[in-house]
Amino acid sequence: MEKIGFIGLGNMGRGMASNIRRKQFAMMVYDLNPKPVAALMELGAEAAADVAALGRASSIAITMLPGPKEVSATAATLLEHMAPGSLLIDMSTVDPETTDALAAAAAAKGVGFVDAPVGRLAAHADRGESLFMVGASDADFARAKPLLEAMGTTIHHCGGPGSGTRTKLVNNYLAIILCQLNAEALSLSQGFGLTLETTLEVLHGTTATNGQLKVNWPNKVLKGDIAPGFAIDLAHKDLSLIMQAANAARVPLPVAAAAREAFSAARAQGHGALDFSAMLDVQCAVAGVKPPRLA
């Protein structure tokens, strides 16, 4: 049986790792925060002393980390200690250059590599309902698939290594830009003195509807919940990755540039740790209107 190592037990990773363990996979976990490690130990997982120990013990190692810097450093240590024939799966949102470098480094060590960034929200991860965009060879995809099925309900094999990361950047570009557009639209509705409920009924019945406004926001900012599921800081990071990748591909994204500056302003005002739906509150403050809330 495979021995699974999981590094990164944050808002998303904790739920994902928990669902793997609930499917009775042998598991070792590591995180700088001892609390989620303790929670996984209660489910029967083993705690690793460090990244190197997890690499030595795991036939499949999974990373779910904040960004390229953390992923690169962690993967470098893992690959020093993982045995040839093992598999490294990175589920973080990073830039294509980082993913391509990891794939090459893994291949040089005789280790398989899968990039499988995650779609949907932390609540979906908790319920085992995540969506995965997977870049992998057919053989590595087949090996990773039972773990992906333990963590989610929707799996897209997007192509070879690196295609999952690139698909995730396209997805997050739309999700994050729509967040800023929603913020501007609803703050405009309040500036016009409109009723939130009626405005939403209209928007939900036209082509203006999108998943942020219809699915995510009613459970977050419009209910007054701006605790981070996906933080403004992370959205800003993703927009930066998206723009960097787009620039490398010579694809202009003027709306992305403007949206990133809106997220930059929110971070400068100290809101970076809030959920990215809180861009509504930031936008309303700029507009001088009261943030709308559903009853």
Image: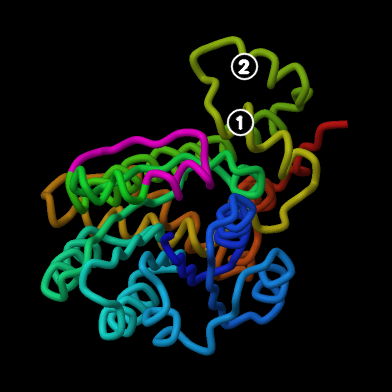
The answer to whether residue 74 is visible is yes
Label 2 packing within 10 angstroms: few (<14), some (14-19), many (20+): some
Counting from the top left corner in percent of width and height, residue 70 is at 39, 77
Residue that badge 1 annotates: 213
- CA gap, disc 1 to disc 2? 8 Å
Q: Secondary structure at mark 2?
A: helix
Counting from the top left corner in percent of width and height, residue 199 is at 70, 20
The answer to whether residue 254 is visible is no
Left or right, 259 with respect to 287, comes to left
Counting from the top left corner in percent of width and height, residue 243 is at 27, 55
Q: Which image quarter: residue 172?
A: top left
Badge count: 2
Q: Which mark is residue 78?
A: none
In magenta stretch: residue 158: yes
Residue drawn at the location 40% of the way across and 60% of the way down:
92
Three-letter code for the amino acid on which mark 2 is drawn: His
Three-letter code for the amino acid on which mark 1 is drawn: Leu
In magenta stretch: residue 162: no
Q: Are marks 1 and 2 in contact (CB under 8 Å)?
A: yes
Residue that badge 2 annotates: 204
Residue drawn at the location 60% of the way across and 58% of the way down:
21
Q: Which residues are magenta?
A: 145-159
Check the image and report above or below for 77 versus 277.
below
Label 1 packing within 10 angstroms: few (<14), some (14-19), many (20+): many
Q: Secondary structure at mark 1?
A: helix
Left or right, 39 with respect to 153, comes to right
